[in-house]
Image: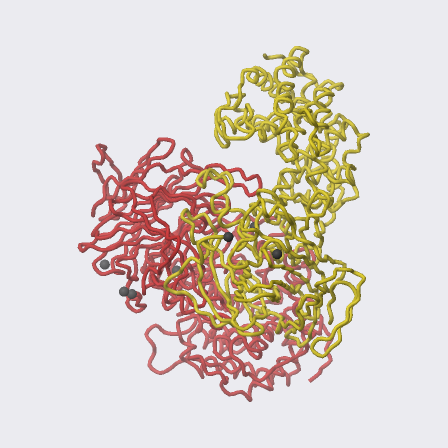
Chain colours: A yellow, B red
Amino acid sequence: WFVACDSEPDSTHYPNVILTGEAVKAIRAEQAHLPLLKQSIDGLQKNVELEMMNGIEVPIPKDPAGGYTHLRHKQNYMNMYGAGVLWQVTGEARFANYVRDMLLAYAELYPTLEVHPVKASYAPGRLFWQQLNEAVWLVYVSQAYDCIAGILTAEQKELIENELLVPYADFLSVENPKVFNRVHNHGVWAAAAVGMTGFAIDNEELVNRAFNGVETGPKEEVGAGFLVQLTQLFSPDGYYTEGPYYQRYAMLPYLLFAQAIDNNRPEMKIFEYRDNILQKAALTTLQLTNTNGQFFPINDALKSMSYMSTSLVHAVDFVYGLDESQKELLSIARQQGEVIICEAGLKVARAIANGEARLFKWESKEFRDGPEGKQGAFGVLRSNSGKNSQTVTMKYASQGMGHGHFDRLTISFYDQGKEILQDYGAARYVNVEYKHGGRYLPENKTWARQTIAHNTLVVDKDSQSEGNVKTASSHHSEPWVFDASKEDVKVMSAKENKAYEGVNMHRTIALLNLPEVSEDAIILDLYRVESEAQHKYHLPYYYKGQMMHTNVDYKAETTALQAMGKNDGYQHLWQTAEGLMTEGTNRFVWLNEDRFYTLTTEAQTNDKLLLTRIGAGDPEFSLRNEPAVIFERDKTASTLFASAIEAHGNKHPVTELVSGLKGHVAEIKTLINNSEYTLVQLAFANESKVVFAICNNSNDQSASHQLMANGQEYNWTGVCQLFK
Amino acid sequence: WFVACDSEPDSTHYPNVILTGEAVKAIRAEQAHLPLLKQSIDGLQKNVELEMMNGIEVPIPKDPAGGYTHLRHKQNYMNMYGAGVLWQVTGEARFANYVRDMLLAYAELYPTLEVHPVKASYAPGRLFWQQLNEAVWLVYVSQAYDCIAGILTAEQKELIENELLVPYADFLSVENPKVFNRVHNHGVWAAAAVGMTGFAIDNEELVNRAFNGVETGPKEEVGAGFLVQLTQLFSPDGYYTEGPYYQRYAMLPYLLFAQAIDNNRPEMKIFEYRDNILQKAALTTLQLTNTNGQFFPINDALKSMSYMSTSLVHAVDFVYGLDESQKELLSIARQQGEVIICEAGLKVARAIANGEARLFKWESKEFRDGPEGKQGAFGVLRSNSGKNSQTVTMKYASQGMGHGHFDRLTISFYDQGKEILQDYGAARYVNVEYKHGGRYLPENKTWARQTIAHNTLVVDKDSQSEGNVKTASSHHSEPWVFDASKEDVKVMSAKENKAYEGVNMHRTIALLNLPEVSEDAIILDLYRVESEAQHKYHLPYYYKGQMMHTNVDYKAETTALQAMGKNDGYQHLWQTAEGLMTEGTNRFVWLNEDRFYTLTTEAQTNDKLLLTRIGAGDPEFSLRNEPAVIFERDKTASTLFASAIEAHGNKHPVTELVSGLKGHVAEIKTLINNSEYTLVQLAFANESKVVFAICNNSNDQSASHQLMANGQEYNWTGVCQLFK
Ligand SMILES: [Ca+2]
Ligand SMILES: [Ca+2]
Ligand SMILES: [Ca+2]
Ligand SMILES: [Mg+2]
Ligand SMILES: [Mg+2]
Ligand SMILES: [Mg+2]
Ligand SMILES: [Mg+2]
């Protein structure tokens, strides 16, 4: 197979899929002066050279995910992609030869392969146990081929295209139309793989197949192919129903194929499709992060995943490449420390070198769910747009398919990027063989998905929708009001009437910026319930940190602990203390690293405070043993849980000085709560007071309201109002 | 009191205590070009200006620690010190006037004061509830007076010296000779305060009092005064018996007074006293840190305390000021981000600006305890001198006075600066009023000090020395061998024969650097026990992180937990699982953030593995709920616990890729264990083997040993040997 080749790449064979001829010329000319680009190229080169030292190995497929042949074929596509790009950028023939020789080896192997011997997927591949990996391989290899095609003889080209690339693309499409036509991220990867290969080998039919899907007889109702996928999977706000952890992954094939389309069929204006849906999705993914860049861990999500991931490097670069006015993206790119080696990455590196980066601004925003934006939403309120802000999220979306949690109206609270009231995330140690081979753990279902694992109301110790995905998927929460336009009070409010039969729930979060009271935001949390029957209510707050204080006279379990139940997640909680709350204002204080947090709650007679710790029913010690405070109200029909949450003070790790030990909220008091209105008063330590009012039976922004409470008259227009 | 004053300070009245005239001139000339110095001055100025805006307030003393008048007088001395220095450095009269006016206010108040109304200390002060604070006030105020004396009229000088400074110094010395003569850090603060005041007001008698103590009739046996204190409190290696957390605090008055002596009586060569003891103590404090700069938390210690503390800023600057060849100190100073505004700080800032900083090197070293270095030691082994090394510490010292823990032969393990096998530290939230006013918690005594709270052997569920401080203080452990001279094996070994009656214990840690096996160090941990009677042994390892795997067939408690005992710390442990170990090699694997750790242990028939979690018997939820694995061997007399500890692999938070999931130690096997020798073999996954041998009855480094084990002959000279 060895063919001597020292020439510069033939200029008529510049690549055209993601990397382009123009970009290659500019990258070669400018890289020395663009540190981020240079660093990205050098990093790639270091990795590829290390791998090239091992020679070429194309083993017969045998192993499942994580096994040797699986990892080898995965590494091979990364190596081919990297070497292809490096051939273009450096002009060093050893890179091109390496790709060529490996492609020829694959062209010899591929025609001999049957279906993969590990039969564990609904859609098995040939090189890999599942077609998802199979498609990813081609997404990278089509780019590698595109880069080195110029050095191939006519015979080599024919061999690689006819024995490898075309049959490989056929396998992913015409031979497996069900996966290919699926409106699902597996389908998107397949479409991208086939379409990008079409561009790489100039095969119009493959490109069209990617656009339109494969005919399977009588046309499916939603249609198939990339354009349909673009319509179905994101909401009009660019929100992906499974949540940001999966959105990150699903974005990559969309972005790559779209960039390839834009390079080759610019007249399609693919990035403008559906009101710039891909750009919106990319920006939404960036916004769905705490201010350390980690994605909000709703549904099945691992908490360490962040916008540092490869997929978001593509997102940042491609979006900036389209719209160079978005200078805020540059500060993220700088943090990412790398760019994609293509025209978009070049633009990013240029602008950063030119000092154009601006701080990224995190927004308060409601992200609607559902293809038409009508299946609830995920709300995010932030005290300001900077890294040190306080952030509250509320989930009032649809179920989020099979990875969804039974967590309607759950909230999370972040202070300065740190989780303070947490969502547990998924119970899984990805890729850690010790823990069920790195798959989702049994506790993901028995614990992480259950309602009690979340900061939301549990009725009668049952999970929402009886823990049934199908039931839960048939309905969604209803946004009531979202208004982040005012400086002193930002509000999100939503209702959930179907999670528990006969119980209507309505939660409102008001983020108060009151500099005269506190330099940090004060969060008002109103959880209203309407029910004709009496129930036992549990409202948990999974605080992170060490409990410091409560005024509740509790009794701790000091010699024995019991699990709190047998099902619906309660079997995973140890009850560590119980106390009868005082009617009126109750306080719970904790310390997280160097700051204090106070949860101030209004209790009724016989309300209980329960303290718990995760870890019961965990025979393999897979759960994190973290605490919660649960407010219990028993034998109650309609009611309101009114609480305030605040960050305050500081404990210096080295000077050991403590300031602001006490929170600012002195009293919380419900003035009115009925089916028409809820009015709650907060009194502060500085003796000032505010009253927050919301209308419960109309969310007409132009309606006027007038009522008496506590001897005072309250007048306002719109759904809610802060009276100071 | 107002006296116009705009002049530059009188050049005949430059200060001489810590800041000196020469230094002032140089600081003024050079500060613009020395970023670290400039930043330190600007930081000080910002703080002082903020405080000056509040005017001068000198309240009548009333409150205990943490109360208003306490904090006010504390802040006042900081403000006077800062303003005094700023007057010298900036020449702006407002700073000098502020100090003068405050001093005059104190001179009016002080003569009216009786003993402080809060009667809670063995040695009450006047401004403060205890003389310790009283002395600290004068350490700072003597410097402030020294700085601004040049602007005072003769009458003002007389007033301040006669009504305030001299009587204040008298109160701390002749009026309270017991505290003043005490060989204890309270005594050192008092001596420094009185001596520095002597230099500031040119009063020889005060200086001599500080040097010699106060005559109290028949001379005490150890003598009194600063020179005696320098002899008694540090070991010849500069180790302070209470441990590094308290050493950091005790260092400051020593260093300040020594610097004042060096400035005013250079002929005393105070820094050379006792073979450079102060320099040794400073460097020892820096070395007693993990590679994040946090002090090893032995005895009562808060874990966040680090070499970023003010005391260590002084230590780094003063030692560098004495010996400008110590360029490694400069990298610490750079991390500290500030210098003391004096000649030493100037030298540091100059050298850093000049690019002279070298990386600090952490050493493997044995720090002897006791005034003559004969009361045991604290050993530290590190795989290398860099930030990413593995570090093991072992405590085989004396009790460490009232703050000591019953933790002889305990070890801790750090990887890349992170605690992996932890010492619990103290049970205390300093300055957090919610938690017993910020004092030591009851659980400090019932839990943190007990033997079971440590990574050392517990015999019959009893604490060492029956948890009696007096008994424990009457003896200490015996160093056996410490040898960090070899690249492939570094060893520390010590015996403890008095902690348990009739039980002789001998622990050896060998840190193996075997690049052919692992890029990380492998720790061999041999805990040998000799006893004629049978006992129940517990050997706990307080691992930090999440358990991943064990080959032991254990049964977890999933529905109820019980406390493990009623006393000696066991009342604070929940038992979460129990399993019978396999005879031979057993493995326990955990994950801490992004790395894996494996503890491989050799078990005998009927050995048990217990899993526990801290948190029982904790009615106020003050303890951290952290796990341990405990090896239990019951009904056994003499025996050996042989284990290996290793860090391995990586779990990437964003790519989610996992490497090096499995440790390198395949088998651990005792070849010989008797009163003469212990030989243990490690077999590795790569099929290589090593044997570690130690002589148990002689630590003569020149003795030769020869013996047969497992059919092989082992010959060596010295106490121990690694056979590869
Ligand atoms: Ca149920
Ligand atoms: Ca006992
Ligand atoms: Ca005892
Ligand atoms: Mg969840
Ligand atoms: Mg309902
Ligand atoms: Mg301890
Ligand atoms: Mg003994």
Give the image location of residue A506, x and y in percent: 65, 60
Residue sitting nearer the eye, A705 or A638: A638
Q: Is residue A255 left or right of residue B716?
A: right
Residue sitting nearer the eye, B100 or A37: A37
Which corner quadrant of the image does residue A391 belong to?
bottom right
Kindly tell me whether residue B265 is visible in this rendering: no
Residue sitting nearer the eye, A497 or B376: A497
| On-image quarter of the C terminus of chain B | top left
| On-image quarter of the N terminus of chain B | bottom right
In the displayed structure, would residue B377 be above or below residue B105? above
> Which residue is outermost to the left?
B532
Task: Say how many tags the image has.
Answer: 0
In the displayed structure, would residue A293 be above or below residue A138? below
> Which residue is outermost to the bottom?
B112
Give the image location of residue A597, x and y in percent: 58, 64
Which corner quadrant of the image does residue B655 belong to?
top right
Q: Residue at x 22, y 61 (%)?
A: B501
Give the image location of residue B242, x and y in percent: 40, 64
Q: Is residue A272 left or right of residue A624?
A: right
Kindly tell me whether residue A719 is visible in this rendering: yes
Give the image location of residue A2, x and y in percent: 59, 12
Residue sitting nearer the eye, A235 or A592: A235
In the displayed structure, would residue B718 be above or below residue B203? above
In the displayed structure, would residue B58 be above or below residue A98? below
> Which residue is outermost to the top?
A155
Q: Is residue A155 left or right of residue A434?
A: right
